[in-house]
Image (tube, rainbow, N blue to C red):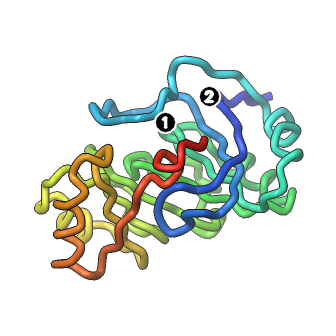
Amino acid sequence: MKKYRINEIFYSIQGEGYHTGTPAVFIRFAGCNLTCDFCDTKHEEVHHNLSISDILAKIKQYQSPIVILTGGEPLLQADFELVKALKRGGRKVHVETNGTVGIGLDSKMQFANLDWITVSPKNGDIKIKKAHELKIVFDGDVQKVLEYEMDIQAKHKFLQPMSGENIHETIQFIKENPQWKLSTQMHKLLKIQ
């Protein structure tokens, strides 16, 4: 029986991007293929090896129909069987990915199997070229933002200040490029998990 390395499962509200303020169950996968200096997620320190039935048992207590696969990098482990089991349980499955792994890694996993895909590129070779949402942590590198915008097809585009430090610069970019919207880490501002 396959086990997934899960850092934590918790119920909260989505604090970033298009679904900000929406209740969701978060499944945080341990491990990432990137090392980002600004990463604010402790996804490696503690993890549990959980089967699909373990995961389903943990999330059944939560009311939200939305489950967000996050990390680390969830697509290093998430697969068609897990997504199918979550959807069979009546959940909508969202994924937050850095875009470097690709959904096609699992031959059964297709774009249509996931209800919402957020690509938040950091660095590395982007394999996911189509998403519902593109969310970039803005470090001031305008050229990088423009390259990601050209490379990744997404209806919704969000720019998020890096650790809240460059808010004015981020807002100025958005004012000059109105196809982008501001994403703040509302959960951090409100100090909720």
Q: Which residue is mark 1?
A: 72
In this figure, what is the number of numbered marks? 2
Decide if residue 158 is on the left or right side of residue 192. Answer: left
Residue 70 location (% of width, % of height): 56, 45
Instruction: Report if residue 159 is visible in the image.
Output: yes
Q: In the picture, which quadrant includes the N terminus?
A: top right
The residue at the far bottom in this view is 178
What kind of residue is marked 1? Answer: Gly
**Mark drawn on residue 62:** none
Marks 1 and 2: CB-CB under 8 Å?
Answer: yes
- The picture places residue 13, in percent across and down from the top left corner, at 64, 54
Residue at image point 44% right, 52% down: 185
Q: Is residue 57 above or below residue 67?
A: above
**Along the line of sight, the residue nearer the viewer: 91 or 193:** 193
Tell me what residue is drawn at x 78 percent, y 62 percent. Answer: 65
N-terminal-most mark, 1 or 2 = 2
Q: Quadrant of residue 133?
A: bottom left
Disc 2 residue type (three-letter):
Asn
Residue under the image location 68 percent in, 31 percent down = 4
SS of the residue under disc 1? loop
Q: Is residue 136 left or right of residue 65?
A: left
The quarter of the picture where the C terminus appears is: top right
